[in-house]
Image (cartoon, grey):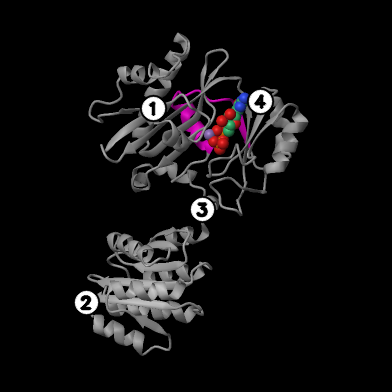
Amino acid sequence: MKLHEFQAKDIFKKSGIPIPNGQLVTAVDQATNVAQIINGPPWMIKAQVHAGGRGKGGGVKMAHSPDEVVASVEALLHKPLVTKQTGPDGVIVNQVLIEEGVEIDRELYLSMVVDRSTAMPTMIFSQAGGMEIEEVAAKSPELVLKEYIEPSVGWMPYQARNLIYGLDLPPSPEAIKGLESVMANVYKLFMSLDCSLVEINPLVITKEMKVIAVDAKISIDENALFRQKELLELDDPREKDPLELMAEEYRLSYIRLDGNIGAMVNGAGLAMATMDVIKLAGAEPANFLDVGGGASEEMITRGFEIILKDKRVKAILINIFGGILRCDVLARGVLAAAKKSSIQVPLIVRLEGTNVEEGREILKNSELEFLVARDLAEAAELVSKQVL
Ligand code: GDP
Ligand code: MN
């Protein structure tokens, strides 16, 4: 679950990580007063959307007068913002953060994630702040410093020194203290809130040698939300893909992708394998959809509806191994969903397992046209014929 910058900064403040003073506005007329409460000039006007890359996309503006603050808010609020991460249509900006501008001396990068290969929380630190870290990692990996943290030991002060003295140019003693404190607090909050990501880019050293988090990004591990109930209200469904939101409501594991072959599969492993098969056949999957081992007819219906709502889908591959989920249940679910919506695209079905004959019979006797594949290889062949 992604948080907005202003929400992440609230958490930073409570965790002892310095942030610029700021105020969130949701209407243009709120912006007139804010310039009197928040120190400036300059002020920073920042679109609150989950996508990154706002700076380059025009979603972060600097204002030098109260009039400019209002004008900048007006330019952002309730309008679409296009960044590298939003797609060409952009996302609507519902909230804008107004902050006191910070005088930047150095921009650093700091984040914490769980490293997959070591299965350890990992602090990532770089002197190349303010830029895209992926790019830095690709072009100059030596600038990306890492410290792995043994959870039973926790964050150790020497690790902060490892990172800080790994910079080409060590900061002043005061800034070093600030950095050490931010690092320790990032680890603490990462662990206590079950984060999957905490990222500060840029982490700024000011001309007065203060260390301030000018940007803030936090993602919470959704599997831990059952014990992070107070964070649930920070969820902003407006930021989500409408189809993914629908899937969430029906408790389906669905991720929208860029291709045009819709896929409905049971089991995450089979779903991954099916996506591979689609790719090997020369096509691209439009989604990941795992209806789950114990899917009911209702869930199948919902899953199918979601795939059909995706206008990019040119063909649908249904690949089900009937174990707990029986093939006849699946077939009835598909038919029920198909009745509700007019299907304009070819359906390729590969069924195997419990009650498979009954399932195939149900599909065959329906008015819908199915291409029934005997195995996965044939299913892939049929898929590629639809798109190539
Ligand atoms: P992002 O592009 O979505 O990551 O948004 P950021 O919050 O990181 O802002 C983009 C860039 O704007 C930063 O890398 C800074 O260079 C600049 N910026 C943000 N806040 C301030 C500020 O208070 N003062 C100055 N001088 N620059 C800022
Ligand atoms: Mn940033």
| CB contact under 8 Å: marks 2 and 4 | no
Which residue occupies the extreme right position in the image? 67
> Which stretch did the figure color magenta?
5-24
The residue type indicated by label 2 comes to Thr
Badge 3 or badge 4: first in the primary sequence:
4
Query: In the depicted view, which residue is nearer to us: 136 or 181?
Result: 136
Badge 1 or badge 3: first in the primary sequence:
1
Badge 1 or badge 2: first in the primary sequence:
1
Residue 203 location (% of width, % of height)? 50, 25
Badge 3 or badge 2: first in the primary sequence:
3
Query: In the depicted view, which residue is nearer to us: 171 or 380?
Result: 380
Q: Residue 290: in sight, yes or no?
A: no
Badge 1 or badge 4: first in the primary sequence:
4
Numbered tag placed on residue 142 in the rendering = 1
Q: Is residue 370 magenta?
A: no
Q: Distance from label 2 to label 4 (Cα)?
A: 66 Å
Residue 208 location (% of width, % of height)? 56, 12
Residue named by callout 2: 354
Residue named by callout 3: 240
| CB contact under 8 Å: marks 3 and 4 | no
Q: Quadrant of the C terminus?
A: bottom left
| Ligand 1 quadrant assignment | top right
The correct choice, above or below, for 208 with respect to 198 in the image is above
The structure residue drawn at horizontal position 34% and vertical position 19%, both measured from the top left corner, is 162
Residue named by callout 4: 38
